[in-house]
Image (cartoon, coloured by chain):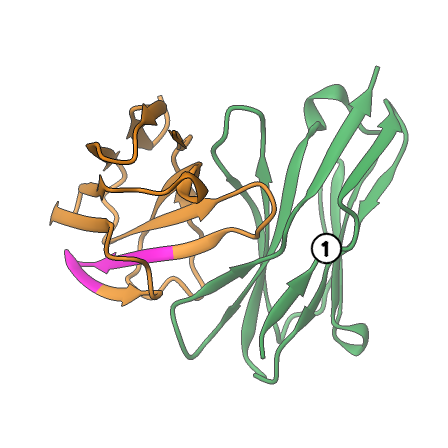
Amino acid sequence: ETGVTQTPRHLVMGMTNKKSLKCEQHLGHNAMYWYKQSAKKPLELMFVYSLEERVENNSVPSRFSPECPNSSHLFLHLHTLQPEDSALYLCASSQDPGNRAGELFFGEGSRLTVL
Amino acid sequence: AQKVTQAQTEISVVEKEDVTLDCVYETRDTTYYLFWYKQPPSGELVFLIRRNSFDEQNEISGRYSWNFQKSTSSFNFTITASQVVDSAVYFCALSMNRDDKIIFGKGTRLHILP
């Protein structure tokens, strides 16, 4: 079992559905992240939470809504998505809120397909 | 602007050959960090190495070695005597000291053929 667990591993949804991605880290880290990995783009940082407070939102559309109820759990709520939102969504955690020097620990990702 | 370029999209080599993955970065900051991550088929990115901008010493870890050259803004990664298990996508990344962002390159998909 990895230190960062993501569920579900695969998700297929229609454009009118509402679903959520879940991430849990068992490493005692203070910061958690959502990244989007699509076929033709570099890894894109979506959200950063440090000590359960959002510190970064890279102009992500409002159809993506993050939630961080505690330092071990991170959710990404999805609603009225578009087909171009189909991608691998990776959760990561790090020891320090400022991850500039620290390594990220990633989950295996949730593969999302929007029909 | 900050940027990481991995010009090699995909590389295939035969097992036991050496292979070098290129990474070129751009930043005007004097303090920054460079990383390499490996993404196997299972999906999760695995941290391989971190190097800060003031440490230009090359590093060797088993079959892996890294060559950091500030003069050419490059941080190349060499796998010696490659193995099939090395097949993965490898990402180079850059982080500045002044903020919390890590900028990833597009990755290089490495195929090690038996």
Left or right of A80: which side holds B114? right
Image x and y of residue A102, in percent: 42, 58
Residue at the spot 74% in from the left edge and 75% down from the top edge: B70
Q: Residue furthest top?
A: B114
Q: Is residue B108 visible?
A: yes
- Colour of chain A as rendered: orange
Image x and y of residue B42, in percent: 51, 24
* Chain the render paints green: B
Residue at the spot 62% in from the left edge and 69% down from the top edge: B3
Left or right of A84: which side holds A50? left
Specify the segment rendered in magenta: A46-54
Examine the image and state in which quarter residue A115 appears.
Answer: top left
User: Which quadrant holds the N terminus of chain A?
Assistant: top left
Residue at the spot 81% in from the left edge and 29% down from the top edge: B82
**Badge 1 amino acid:** Gln
Image x and y of residue B57, in percent: 72, 65
Q: Is residue B74 above or below residue B19?
A: below
Residue at the spot 72% in from the left edge and 55% down from the top edge: B6
